[in-house]
């Protein structure tokens, strides 16, 4: 959602991904821009799917989640793990979509 808004594809966005244990690909990926999108929600979803690999192993690799061990995640115990400007929080990096 952050990348969709930062790329100017929408002013507001809900992004959902659902998984099942043992399956490499998500069961569903959903985008709702609440009518604020510059393209249809379906078009934005296709753009996002072309830029991100949603398989869990690939997300861990692309976000470098195994770097630094558990100490990296101890920082998330205080003040949460979203909306923070910290180099260790690789999931906060905006990916240019448009």
Image (cartoon, grey):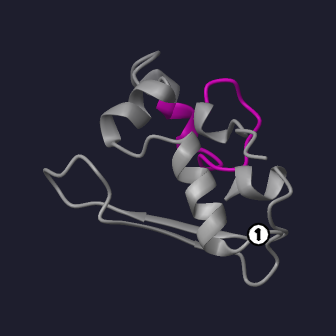
SS assignment for the magenta stretch, majority:
loop
Residue at 82%, 77% in the rendered image: 36
Which image quadrant is residue 2 in?
A: bottom right
Residue 18, given in percent of the width and then of the height, sits at: 35, 65
x, y percentage for residue 80?
A: 60, 50
Report crowding for label 1: few under 14, some 14 to 19, many 20 or more residues within 10 A (C-alpha).
few
Q: Position of residue 19 (x, y in %)?
A: 29, 60
| Residue 89, above or below 71 | below
Q: How many marks?
A: 1
Q: Is residue 87 magenta?
A: yes
Residue 90 vertical placement versus 10 (above, below): above
| Whether residue 32 can be seen here | no
Give the quarter of the image for residue 5: bottom right
On the rendered structure, is 47 left or right of 61?
Answer: right
As rendered, which of 80 and 35 lies closer to the eye?
Answer: 35
Check disc 1 and report its element: helix, strand or loop. loop
At 64% from the left edge and 65% from the top edge, which residue is drawn?
Answer: 43
> Which residue matches tag 1?
39
Span colored in magenta: 73-89
Residue 84: tell me if it is visible. yes
Q: Is residue 31 magenta?
A: no
Q: Nearer the viewer, residue 86 or 39?
A: 39
Relative to residue 50, is residue 32 drawn left or right? right
Tell which of 5 and 84 is nearer to you: 5
- Residue 96 relative to residue 70: left or right: right
Residue at the farthest top position? 68
């Amino acid at each position: 959602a952050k990348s969709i808004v930062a790329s100017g594809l929408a002013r507001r966005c809900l992004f959902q991904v659902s998984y099942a244990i043992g399956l490499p690909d998500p069961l569903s990926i959903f985008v709702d821009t609440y009518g604020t999108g510059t393209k249809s929600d379906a078009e934005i979803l296709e753009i996002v799917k072309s830029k991100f690999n949603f398989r869990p192993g690939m997300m861990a690799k692309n976000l470098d989640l195994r770097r630094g061990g558990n100490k990296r995640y101890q920082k998330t115990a205080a003040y949460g793990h979203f909306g923070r400007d910290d180099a260790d929080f690789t999931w906060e990096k905006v990916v240019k979509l448009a």
